[in-house]
Image (cartoon, rainbow, N blue to C red):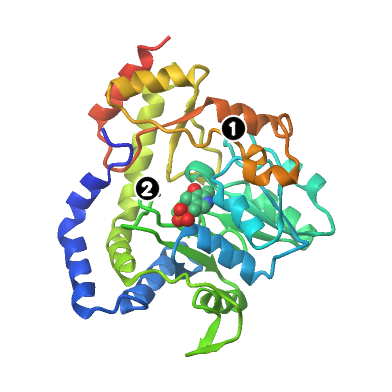
């Protein structure tokens, strides 16, 4: 069984994807080819916010922070229960990540804990939409507005998700996503995008992702090289056409898991007003090692997102985080495990996962 069945997905769209790749090869416009702006238009129409494609989701965060002039002396509030890139990019631009604990029901940042962490140096809040479900963006936006902060949504796992009818990536001033192959909408290598409806920020991100260039060999800003490859754009144009259908299938698969498993383990909840794209289907168990090895013996892959919260990571030792600082993040990091999930997961596979799980004490 595949954890994320990219082989079956490719087989379904193979004719179109092969043709799209072949067209790029024939035209040989590998950087800034026409597919890149075509993809940006399609992403913009899908999300409702202007897309700027870039090389990966980590760069997208860096570009957003750079466009907001966040750097040394600034603080950015975020969650300790996320992939490293979120806090890593805050530190990389020279700012300080400031963590707040998460909510036990959806694993996302607890808005009630934010205000206590705001100082005169706070510039932004990065709300991560973990496992495919967006944070409490209304509450977070209200706090940000009151204190004149910018909200960045790290939507690397939630592209396509909705909150009160609006899409993830269109719920705050600026947002970022990733098209890493295993994300809900993935390309065939690295890819990402920044989203904003703020024209000035859009122009700045476009400039920063291409060496700060304003016209050929004239550089207005110190930027980075973070363009999206034409080949990746061509793949994404095809996959985006089928993405809505895939989201529905992921939701069906998640509902079936919950139906099979909710008497056995703690299954993930979807909050009111929200629709998840199920980047991960993540359960909570007390005997994780044992369950993972039982699944592994049955050739069922599983994963832990994430075993160590960021305040306890060696690279952030300088921030002085210690055990006990964020009790919910620490507790769930010992309990969570993700089961195979994709639009191409079959009912038979899910039955096998459930049967194996239920055979455990
Ligand atoms: C995957 C991910 C990223 C980074 O995306 P890449 O494309 O791998 O650089 C950032 N934040 C979160 C929450 C992610 O899951």
Where on the picture, by quarter, is residue 53? bottom left
* Residue 193 tag number: none
Number of marks in picture? 2
The vertical placement of 211 against 258, above or below, is: below
User: Residue, x 54% and y 25% (percent of image)?
Assistant: 335
Relative image position of residue 239 (x, y in whole percent): 29, 58
State which tag comes first along the sequence, 2 or 1: 1
The answer to whether residue 343 shows anywhere in this view is yes
* Quarter of the image where the N terminus is located: top left
* Residue 182 tag number: 2
The answer to whether residue 163 shows anywhere in this view is no
Of all residues, the one furthest to the left in this rendering is 15
103 left or right of 206 in image: right
User: Residue, x 46% and y 20% (percent of image)?
Assistant: 289
* Quarter of the image where the C terminus is located: top left
Mark 1 Cα within 10 Å, few/some/many (few <14, many 20+)?
A: few
Disc 2 is placed on an element classified as loop
Q: Of discs 2 and 1, which sits in the foreground?
A: 2
83 left or right of 21 in image: right
Relative image position of residue 263 (x, y in whole percent): 44, 16
Q: Is mark 1 within 8 Å of ligand 1?
A: no
User: Residue, x 37% and y 78% (percent of image)?
Assistant: 32
Disc 1 is placed on an element classified as loop
The vertical placement of 153 against 357, above or below, is: below
| C-alpha span from label 2 to label 1 | 24 Å
Relative image position of residue 153 (x, y in whole percent): 58, 56
Mark 2 Cα within 10 Å, few/some/many (few <14, many 20+)?
A: many
Q: Which residue is mark 1?
A: 105
Relative image position of residue 188 (x, y in whole percent): 31, 57
Where on the picture, by quarter, is residue 16? bottom left
Where on the picture, by quarter, is residue 107? top right
Closer to us: 259 or 325: 325
């Amino acid at each position: 069984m595949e954890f994320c069945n990219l082989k079956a997905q490719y087989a379904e769209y193979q004719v179109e994807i092969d043709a799209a790749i072949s067209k790029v090869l024939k035209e040989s416009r590998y950087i800034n080819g026409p597919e890149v702006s075509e993809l940006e238009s399609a992403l913009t129409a899908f999300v409702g916010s202007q897309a700027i494609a870039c090389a990966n989701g980590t760069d997208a965060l860096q570009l957003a922070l750079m466009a907001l002039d966040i750097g040394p002396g600034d603080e950015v509030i975020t969650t300790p229960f996320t992939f490293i890139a979120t806090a890593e990019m805050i530190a990389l631009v020279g700012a300080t990540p400031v963590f707040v604990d998460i909510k036990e029901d959806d694993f996302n940042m607890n808005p009630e804990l934010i205000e206590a962490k705001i100082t005169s140096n706070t510039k932004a809040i990065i709300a991560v939409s973990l496992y495919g479900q967006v944070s409490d963006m209304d509450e977070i936006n209200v706090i940000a507005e009151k204190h004149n902060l910018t909200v960045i949504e790290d939507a690397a796992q939630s592209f396509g998700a909705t909150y009160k009818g609006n899409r993830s990536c269109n719920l705050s001033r600026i947002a970022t996503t990733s098209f890493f192959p295993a994300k809900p909408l993935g390309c065939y290598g690295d890819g990402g995008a920044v989203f904003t409806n703020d024209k000035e920020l859009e122009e700045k991100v476009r400039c920063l992702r291409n060496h700060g260039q304003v016209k050929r060999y004239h550089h207005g800003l110190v930027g980075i090289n973070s363009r999206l490859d034409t080949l990746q754009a061509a793949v994404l144009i095809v996959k985006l056409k089928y993405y809505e259908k895939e989201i529905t299938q992921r939701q069906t698969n998640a509902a079936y898991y919950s139906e099979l498993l909710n008497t056995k383990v703690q299954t993930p909840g979807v909050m009111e007003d929200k629709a998840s794209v199920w980047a991960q289907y993540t359960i909570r168990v007390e005997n994780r090692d044992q369950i993972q090895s039982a699944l592994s013996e049955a050739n069922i892959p599983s994963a832990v997102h994430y075993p160590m919260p960021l305040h306890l990571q060696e690279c952030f030792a300088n921030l002085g985080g210690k055990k006990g600082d964020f009790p919910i993040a620490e507790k769930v990091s010992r309990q969570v495990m993700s089961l195979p999930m994709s639009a191409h997961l079959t009912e038979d596979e899910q039955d096998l996962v459930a049967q194996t799980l239920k055979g455990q004490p």
